[in-house]
Image (cartoon, rainbow, N blue to C red):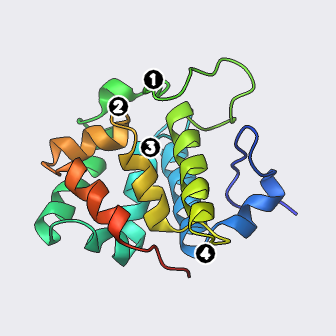
Amino acid sequence: MQNRTAYSGGDGPAQEDLDTQLTVGLASVVSAARRRATRDGDRQVDTAHLLHGLLESDPAVRAAFDGGPQVARLLGYLVQRSIGYGLQWHGTVEDSGAVPAVTEGGVPGWSPAAAAAMDGALDRAHARYATRAGCLDLLAALVDDPESRAVEVLRRACVDTARLAARLDGESPGQD
């Protein structure tokens, strides 16, 4: 069986097992992020690709922000990635420094920060005794890395990331 998410983190689950640990919604976000990275000519899925997928596909993620104008501003920055904003990222590997840089044995096709965010989403789900990580788990994991591309986009769109993190810590991510 081929894994539709195509992710396998370091000591985490094997590729075949990952689908069983993601909600349907999060698996769809991961697939969309991979397609976006490929379409944009990026070598790796990064945290901004994941954020874009979350905002486009999950109403609960959009509801975590301060209303429609803020979400529209975020999507505007993310859409501009390949035509202006974010061009400095093109062809580079996202390494926020939150995790040690991986030169060998990393997750193929994933930036170190994106792989860490996926692992963080799984850890967050397991911490609340859930069997599957959901979209809000991934959003919280993205916000936890202050040096990631996703957080850079959030800050440029005037999102108070500390407030967002606190809001996400108070919410219980739902299952699909």
Q: Which mark is drawn over residue 25?
A: none
- Give the mark nearer the N terminus: 4 vs 3: 4
Q: Residue at x 73, y 46 (%)?
A: 8
Mark 1 — residue? 97
Lateral position of residue 140 relative to residue 121, left or right: left
Within 10 Å of the Cα at label 3, are there few (<14), some (14-19), or many (20+) other Cα atoms? many
Mark 3 — residue? 47
Distance CA(mark 2)–CA(mark 3) = 10 Å
Looking at the image, which is closer to me, 48 or 13? 13
- Give the mark nearer the N terminus: 2 vs 1: 1
Lateral position of residue 91 relative to residue 26, left or right: left
Report the amino acid beneath label 4. Val
Mark 2 — residue? 147
Above or below residue 70? Residue 39 is above
Distance CA(mark 2)–CA(mark 1) = 7 Å
Mark 4 — residue? 24
Would you say residue 76 is visible in this rendering?
no
- Give the mark nearer the N terminus: 2 vs 4: 4
Contact (Cβ within 8 Å) of mark 2 with mark 4: no
Report the amino acid beneath label 1. Gly
